[in-house]
Amino acid sequence: MAKDKEIVFIGSFVAKTSIVAEIINELNQDLLKMEYPQEEIFEITIAMDESVSNAVKATIENTPEASKKLYITVRYNITETEFDATIIDRGKGLDFIKTLNTTPHSKSNNYRNQLMDYTAASTDAVDAGTESKTHPSSLTINNENVSLNGVGAGLKIILSYMDYVFIEYIDKKEIIATNVSESTDGTIFNMKRKRRNFNNE
């Protein structure tokens, strides 16, 4: 593999669920070109799928009228030693701390109740239009099927696969803000990870 080899991808896309697969397919091909191992390709593409899906969903939910088109921007850099991506949406912002605190914790005493509460809140939040979350999942607890919609579970997946996650908000008043407010009009989501077990002989 040539030294200092790098693949850069950047594009702006109308927020619709069909673009997620296009972006992920491109990313998969680029990771293969950079000779990333299959396990790392899987982890990176899962994290990006969650991030782009969440950006699309947040932007759709923040679109005031069906005829207006809002865009998301996706950028990633792949080098021999690092993956770095930024996704910019036009949503109302992700309250990072609140999301982590309200996501079910499997080691807690009332995990089942947390799942049920989380599912009810997440289902209420899903857009009722034709656009919806691309990959809703479910699990069975005590013979009861529980749907896991919403951003919380996805955020934990992203955090488990990435070394670094940073969120800033686009604010109508402050331009860039560090917390969600009534003026938030977008999120800048950046994530990075070092390549695992890379031998640069």
Image: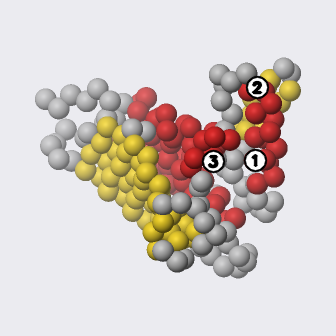
Tag 2: amino acid: Asn
Which residue occupies 60% across, 66% down?
181
Q: Residues within 10 Å of mark 3 (few under 14, many from 20)?
A: few
Q: Nearer the viewer, residue 10 or 98?
A: 98
Q: Is residue 16 above or below residue 111?
A: below
Q: Which residue is mark 2?
A: 110
Q: Which residue is mark 3?
A: 98
Secondary structure type for disc 2: loop
Q: Position of residue 9 (x, y in %)?
A: 37, 58
Q: Is residue 19 visible?
A: no
Which residue occupies 50% across, 69% down?
170
Q: Which residue is mark 1?
A: 122
Q: Residues within 10 Å of mark 2 (few under 14, many from 20)?
A: few
Q: Quadrant of the C terminus?
A: top left
* Badge 3 vs badge 2, beta-carbon distance below 8 Å: no
Q: Is residue 179 visible?
A: yes
| Residue 182 sits in quarter | bottom right
Q: Position of residue 152 (x, y in %)?
A: 64, 43
> What's the distance in space between the residues labelled 3 and 1, CA to CA?
14 Å
| Residue 196 sits in quarter | top left
- Describe residue 126's horizontal placement relative to residue 157 as left or right: right
Precedes in sequence: disc 3 or disc 1: 3
Which residue occupies 36% across, 40% down?
193
Secondary structure type for disc 3: helix
Which residue occupies 39% across, 43% down?
164
| Residue 82 sits in quarter | top left
Precedes in sequence: disc 3 or disc 2: 3
Q: Coloring scheme of the render?
A: secondary structure
Q: Quadrant of the N terminus?
A: top left
Circle nearer the viewer, 3 or 1: 3
